[in-house]
Amino acid sequence: MQTWVEGKVVEKIRWNDELYSVRIDAPVAGFEAGQFTKIALDIDGERVGRAYSYVNAPTDPLVEIHFNTVPEGPLTPRLAAMEAGDRLWVVAEPNGFLTLAEVPDRPHLWLLASGTGVGPFVSILRTEAPWRRFERIVVVHAARRAADLAYRDLFGALEAAHPGQFRFVPFVSREATDFALTGRIPDAIADGRLEERAGLPLSPETSNVMVCGNSGLIADSLKALEARGLRRHRRREPGHVITEKYH
């Protein structure tokens, strides 16, 4: 049974015309970095809600979510139009298992994301746990345009703060850049470009991989990783690749 609590918008971050983050003051329960909540508005007499990962660290008192607007959708255009002081609904209890508690003990952590799927990884990297636990951490973020690479400045700051431990590998598919790889993450796993750029091997002995994004990224990355000997992780059958089911 989910409990809805009222939240108040504190800040809206507009990354571009379609991409936003919103910070919300709401009396939610504690959560683990990587988990998600639901955000809702009452629209035409119906409570319309969607799942969104926490982007803030668990120690941050404000809930932060990250989303694309869907022009024909009932919820996201209204969320994008909200300003500080506006009210919305938040589910108080966290959900999900895309957390470090689910990750087996291996020295390297790969975080593969497309679009707003980077959100839970931002939350994880805002905690101390990954920096204490893993020798190497690689964030791989794929987007259509360079302007869609939200939190890029944060990743740059993490590279400066953790030299030799952290690497950010961006992908941009619909425009040329002088810093990002082109194409899709699964293809770059298959042809070795991702490992070359990261300076780190993807191997069953050393690697854990968390994947969050569109269904194509998840399915195709899993196939490419399985071809390299990495298999889906399950509690009853420990493996290497961890994904999330949002509901």
Image (spheres, helix red, strand yellow):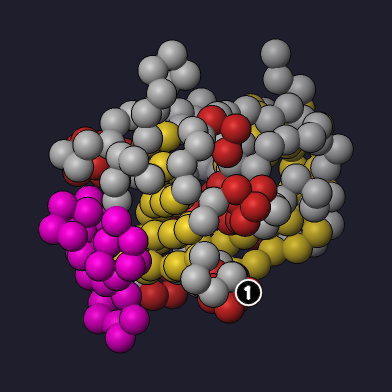
- Name of the residue lying farthest toward the left: 191
Magenta stretch in the rendered image: 174-201
Quadrant position of residue 58: top right
Viewer can see residue 54: no
Q: Nearer the viewer, residue 234 or 45?
A: 234
Who's the residue at 42% across and 34% down the image?
Answer: 242
Sort mark 1 into few (<14), some (14-19) or many (20+) by Cα contacts within 10 Å.
Answer: few
Q: Is residue 197 magenta?
A: yes
- Tell how many labels: 1
Who's the residue at 29% across and 46% down the image?
Answer: 203
Quadrant position of residue 184: bottom left
Q: Eyeballing the image, is 54 above or below 84?
A: above
Q: Is residue 69 magenta?
A: no
Who's the residue at 30% across and 82% down the image?
Answer: 177
The image shows residue 87 at horizontal and vertical percentages of 79, 47
Q: Eyeballing the image, is 236 above or below 72?
A: above
| Left or right: residue 193 compared with residue 210 | left
The image shows residue 74 at horizontal and vertical percentages of 52, 42
Q: Eyeballing the image, is 8 above or below 156?
A: above
Q: Nearer the viewer, residue 104 or 28?
A: 104
The image shows residue 194 at horizontal and vertical percentages of 26, 62
**Amino acid at dot 1:** Ala
- Residue under numbered circle 1: 161
